[in-house]
Amino acid sequence: MRGSIMADSEWTRAQAARSIERLLPRLRAELADARAADPAGWECFEARLAREWPRLFALLLQLYGGHYDFFYHLEQILLAAGRAWEQRSPALRALDERRAADPFWYQSQRMLGAVLYVDRFAGTLAGLRERLPYLEQLGITYLHLMPLFLSPEGNNDGGYAVSSYRTVNPAIGTMDELAALADTLRERGISLVLDFVFNHTSNEHEWALKARAGDPEYQEFYHIFPDRTIPDQYDRTLREIFPSVRRGSFTWDEGMGRWIWTTFNSFQWDLNYANPAVFRAMAEEMFFLANIGVEVLRLDAVAFIWKRLGTNSENQPEAHSIIQAFNALARIACPALLFKSEAIVHPDEVVRYISLDEAQLSYNPLLMALCWEALATREVRLLARALATRWRIAEGCAWVNYLRSHDDIGWTFDDDDARAVGIDPWGHRRFLNAFYTGDHPASFARGVPFQANPTTGDARVSGTLASLAGLEQALQEHNPILIDLAVRRILLLHSVMLSAGGIPLLYIGDELATLNDYGFTHDPARAGDSRWIHRVAFDWTRPERWSDMASPAGYIYNELLRLIALRKEQEAFGGSALEVFDTGNPHLLGYVRHNNGQRLTCVANFSERPQTLTANRLRLHGLGYRFCDLNTGARLSADEALALAPYQFVWLETV
Ligand code: OTU
């Protein structure tokens, strides 16, 4: 498909030029008032349109060129972009210009992300507004509020079943409050991040209700089948994502008397992007979110948006084209808007979503999973290999590095990478699952399985960071030595996240070492989904304990505040350049960060025993003889080996 576009590229360019020539007068007429009100702004819009149109046209032609109504949809998409610009507030147009002047702002070491559920953190949007000082004290500059849209009552997959992208869940607040919050955040230097749940809608979305009522136009919005013939053909090659919900990827809908494609829960209906009307409708929802002041859209479940018979229907080339087309539209109408890819898939596939033309930001599921892998094995060979071979991404883009999220942990490393360092991938995943679900005699972790698949033996892991790192077990055993080790593990993981480059993303609650909450099993809407064990309501009842350095939570909280402040002062932690080096010690991870003239050598001990880095290697990789460990202020010399205490990490600057 890509090949034919290339071969036809001249023809395509000519078509693109002709089409915009024809469409532009329509657009200018439609936006006459807005153009008159901001002629300079319109000039910028037209310049962006001229720049982006050839690629947008080529992408849409490739996706929808065969559709009988292609030119009608093309016109409607362009008009939607124009109206989005028309409705963009002066403050957001000003933001567009600021970002154009500093396009890689998100690579600064001052960036720090946080992610939370509004209801579980602060009850409502009004409550969140009152709690902003807490987030500001942490140094947050990027705030991801998990889905807060209208959603079905009861189980709604933590909001990932959206019934309206333009309505806030009334229990949380209103769209006006959300827009006002976005303004406040922006004024305080915090970018609002929301989900773009665009692979599916809830079965209560207006489109789904119309489809159910028999409206053929809206039945085309989804993948609907009269009987099992085609679903059976697809099911043969699809991965089951939520096998404990149902087997296979299709759900029988009683109301319609039809089968419907549901990759995730049965109430999450996959959208049909082969239909240009779906692309256009979702583009309009994207513009709406951009214009309430969202600066980053987290592209939920990107891997699944295009289906192809005979494949696993993940990571299809068209999925990339669709995101690129959304990206081009954003560049035209609301250029400050960035995308973050949520592709929790094979590492080869994760990086394919990352480029300035597609998603500028991406979760880094490999770093996340391998930090936990190294913590379990006390060895860094797989982690070091991944950092050495899979860290680099497209110029100008950034990883979003995280340790825990609202989701499970999956062991998405590459099998050959594992074999290359002498690890049997299949056995290793079994070991990791056993280790983290407490099914291993030597484990410190208190996690639980998520979506165990009885057929394939696959499973993922749920649990809070602190519980997985051993704090829950240590506290239960009232064992001060184990408590100390767990606290060290928690800080070690955060040190990697804060120093590796890209945007570190804190899962709110982890900074206070929140433990698993087993209460979800009593709530029928949540009992079937073990991820609720780590979606814990924030405990505001005893804020005084945060200053209590004698409690693990207080100690961790204050240490993290210190590390965050330290990170923000180091130019070397900005940008993305990272070089991993061989420490000659299987327990020590070593990497060099350099940026804007500063260079830092980081060493992290993933074992509970003291370890050393030889003086030779320290000189070689530290590029010097005398160092200062920024973390402790200690002065070191490379006359002797570098000694690291259990789980200690150092950030060394040559002095
Ligand atoms: C996302 O995750 C969200 O993060 C989840 O909270 C949602 O349940 C889901 O989409 C549906 O909206 O399966 O277990 O391989 O791992 O996209 C999490 C990619 C998920 C999937 C990921 C998905």
Image (tube, helix red, strand yellow):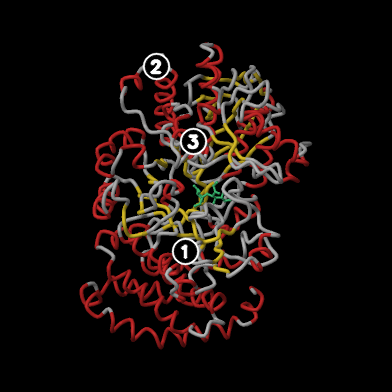
Q: Does the rendering let one see residue 25?
A: yes
Q: Which of marks 1 and 2 is nearer the N terminus?
A: 1
Q: Are marks 2 and 3 in contact (CB under 8 Å)?
A: no
The x and y percentages for residue 611 are 65, 20
Element at label 1 = loop
> Which residue position is annotated with label 1?
255
Which residue shows up at 61% across the image and 68% down it? 227
- Nearer the N terminus, badge 2 or badge 3? 3
Q: Which residue is identified by label 2?
A: 549
Q: Nearer the viewer, residue 189 or 378?
A: 378
* Left or right of residue 111, residue 614 in this image: right
| Within-10-Å neighbours for mark 3: few <14, some 14–19, many 20+ | many
Q: Which mark sits nearer the N-terminus, 3 or 1?
A: 1
**Where does the image place residue 604, in percent across and percent down from the top left?**
59, 28
Residue kind at label 2, given as amino acid type: Met
Three-letter residue code for mark 3 = Leu
Q: In which quarter of the image is the N terminus?
A: bottom right
Contact between marks 1 and 2 (CB within 8 A): the answer is no
Residue type at numbered disc 1: Gly
- State the CA–CA distance, disc 1 to disc 2: 58 Å
Lateral position of residue 180 relative to residue 337, left or right: left
Q: What element carries label 3?
A: helix
Q: Circle 2 — which element?
A: loop
The CA span between labels 2 and 3 is 21 Å
Please tell me which residue is depicted at 51% across the width and 24% down the height of the picture: 628
Residue nearest the observer in this picture, 192 or 108: 192
Q: Does the residue labelled 1 lie within 8 Å of ligand 1?
A: no
Q: Quadrant of residue 381?
A: top right
Labelled disc at residue 531: none
Residue under label 3: 498
User: Residue at position x 45%, y 39% from top?
Assistant: 524
